[in-house]
Image (cartoon, rainbow, N blue to C red):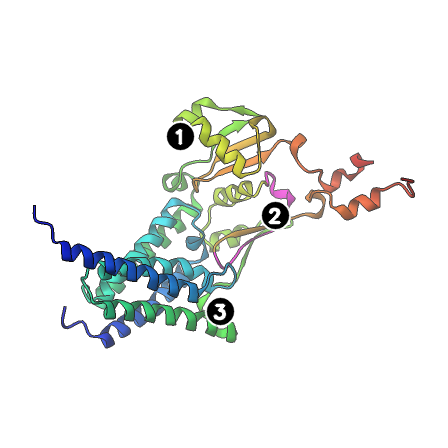
C-alpha cells in the first residue's frame, strides 16, 4: 500500500472520530448502557467499521453510510420495541425466574441451560450463599441474573425501625 | 507445507510492539467511570482493538498504524478536555441524565424519550435488588448509559445513626 500516506490517515481518522461522536450522541445513552444483547452487538459493529476506512480500503463516504444505517436501524428497532411489549420480547428474551421463594426452578434452569454450579456462582456474586435466602432470582433480558433477597434476609428498612426496640 | 519462518518472526515482533505500544496509550488515556467521554471509552477501545490487526499482520506499516492510533488517542483527549472546559461542548457531545422514576412514579414520557421499555427499567431495578418501584425516590439514566437508583428514606436499611436514636436513654456497660 504505497498510496497510504500519513496525512490521509490523519484526516480519515479525525473525520471518523468526530462522526462517531455525533452518531453515538444521536443514538442515545441507552445503547451505551448495553441493556439488551443487541446494544452490545451494535457497539461491536460500530467499532469494527472504522479500521477499513482508516486504511482507505473503503471510501470515507461508504463507511459513513454503513455506520449511519446501523445506528438508524437500531434507533428504529428500539423506538418500536419501547412502545410495544410483545415486539420487545422479539428483541430480548423475557426475564425468566430461576429461583422462587427459595426453591430452584429446575425446569427453567434446564430451559436456559444453567448448571447448578452456575446458579451458585450467580448467587455468590450477589453476596448470597444459599437459594433459601432468595425470594426471587431471574435471568434478565440483559443476560445477567438478578437476585431479590427474602424479606427475612434483608436489612431492616427504616419504616420498620420500631422492630428494633 | 512451507513455513515462512522470517514472516512468523516478524509477526511475533510486531505483536510484541503493538502490545507494548497500546499498553502505553491506554495508560496515558486513563480510565474513568465519570464524565460523558467515559461513555465513548468503549467505542474508542473497540476502534483501537480493530486497528491493530492490520499492523500485526503487516498489511500496513508500523508508522501508518502508530499514526492512526495516536490520532484516535489525541482526539479522545481533546474531546474529554473540551467537554470539561466548555459546558456547550459538554452538552453537544454528551446527553444529560434522564429521570426515569420520580417518587415511586415511572416517568413514561422520559422512558419513551430514551426508547426504553418498561420491562427494561424493571429489570434494571431488580438488578439493584429493588422489587417495588414505590421504594424508588429517583431512578436516573446516567450519561454513560447506566441506570442509578436512589431509594426512598423509609425503604433504606437502618443506618448506624438510627441506632443511637433507638438506644434507651442511658445504659450502663
Label 3 Cα neighbours within 10 Å, binned few <14 / some 14-19 / many ≥20? few
Q: Nearer the viewer, mark 1 or mark 3?
A: 1
Q: Is residue A67 visible?
A: no
Q: Which mark is residue B105?
A: 2
Q: Does the magenta stretch include residue B142?
A: yes
- Classify mark 1: helix, strand or loop: loop
The residue at which mark 1 appears reads as A112
Q: Are marks 3 and 2 in contact (CB under 8 Å)?
A: no
Q: What's drawn in magenta, residue-wise? A: B130-144
The residue at which mark 3 appears reads as B91
Q: Which chain carries label 3?
A: B
- Classify mark 2: helix, strand or loop: strand
Q: Nearer the viewer, mark 2 or mark 1?
A: 1
Q: Are marks 1 and 3 in contact (CB under 8 Å)?
A: no
Label 2 Cα neighbours within 10 Å, binned few <14 / some 14-19 / many ≥20? some
Location of residue B132 with respect to A33 vertically, above or below = above
**Image quarter (top left, top right, bottom left or bottom right) of the N terminus of chain B:** top left
Residue A95, given in percent of the width and then of the height, sits at 46, 35
Q: Which chain carries label 1?
A: A
Quarter-wise, where is residue A62 in the image? Answer: bottom left
Q: Which residue lies furthest to the left in this view?
A: B1
Front-most of A32 and B112? A32
Q: Is residue B159 magenta?
A: no
The span from disc 1 to disc 3 (Cα, nearest Å) is: 42 Å
The residue sitting at 66% across, 35% down in the picture is A154
The span from disc 2 to disc 1 (Cα, nearest Å) is: 33 Å
Location of residue A98 with respect to B159 vertically, above or below = above
Q: Can residue A64 be seen in this view?
A: yes
- Classify mark 3: helix, strand or loop: helix
Amino acid at each position: 500500500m504505497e498510496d497510504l500516506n500519513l496525512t490521509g490517515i490523519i484526516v480519515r481518522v479525525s473525520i471518523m472520530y468526530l462522526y462517531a461522536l455525533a452518531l453515538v450522541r444521536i443514538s442515545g445513552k441507552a445503547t451505551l448502557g448495553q441493556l439488551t444483547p443487541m446494544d452490545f452487538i451494535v457497539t461491536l459493529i460500530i467499532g469494527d467499521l472504522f479500521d477499513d476506512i482508516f486504511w482507505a480500503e473503503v471510501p470515507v463516504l461508504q463507511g459513513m453510510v454503513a455506520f449511519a444505517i446501523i445506528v438508524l436501524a437500531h434507533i428504529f428497532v428500539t423506538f418500536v420495541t419501547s412502545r410495544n411489549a410483545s415486539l420487545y420480547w422479539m428483541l430480548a428474551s423475557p426475564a425468566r425466574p430461576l429461583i422462587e421463594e427459595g426453591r430452584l426452578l429446575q425446569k427453567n434452569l434446564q430451559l436456559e441451560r444453567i448448571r447448578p454450579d452456575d446458579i451458585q456462582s450467580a448467587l455468590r456474586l450477589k453476596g448470597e450463599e444459599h437459594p433459601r435466602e432468595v425470594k426471587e432470582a431471574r435471568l434478565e433480558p440483559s443476560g445477567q441474573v438478578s437476585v431479590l433477597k427474602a424479606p427475612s434476609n434483608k436489612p431492616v428498612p427504616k419504616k420498620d425501625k420500631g422492630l428494633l426496640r | 507445507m512451507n513455513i515462512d519462518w522470517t514472516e512468523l518472526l516478524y509477526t511475533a515482533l510486531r505483536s510484541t510492539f503493538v502490545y507494548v505500544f497500546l499498553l502505553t496509550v491506554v495508560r496515558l488515556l486513563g480510565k474513568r467511570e465519570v464524565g460523558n467521554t467515559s461513555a465513548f471509552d468503549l467505542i474508542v477501545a473497540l476502534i483501537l482493538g480493530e486497528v491493530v490487526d492490520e499492523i500485526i499482520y503487516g498489511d500496513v506499516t508500523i508508522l501508518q498504524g502508530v499514526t492512526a492510533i495516536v490520532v484516535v488517542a489525541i482526539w479522545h483527549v481533546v474531546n474529554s478536555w473540551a467537554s470539561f472546559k466548555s459546558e456547550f461542548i459538554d452538552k453537544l457531545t454528551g446527553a444529560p441524565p434522564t429521570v426515569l422514576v420520580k417518587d415511586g412514579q415511572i416517568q413514561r414520557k422520559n422512558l419513551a424519550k430514551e426508547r426504553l421499555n418498561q420491562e427494561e427499567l424493571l429489570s434494571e431495578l431488580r438488578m439493584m435488588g429493588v422489587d417495588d418501584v414505590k421504594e424508588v425516590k429517583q431512578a436516573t439514566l446516567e450519561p454513560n448509559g447506566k441506570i442509578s437508583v436512589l431509594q426512598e428514606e423509609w425503604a433504606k436499611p437502618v443506618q448506624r445513626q438510627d441506632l443511637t436514636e433507638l438506644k434507651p436513654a442511658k445504659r450502663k456497660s
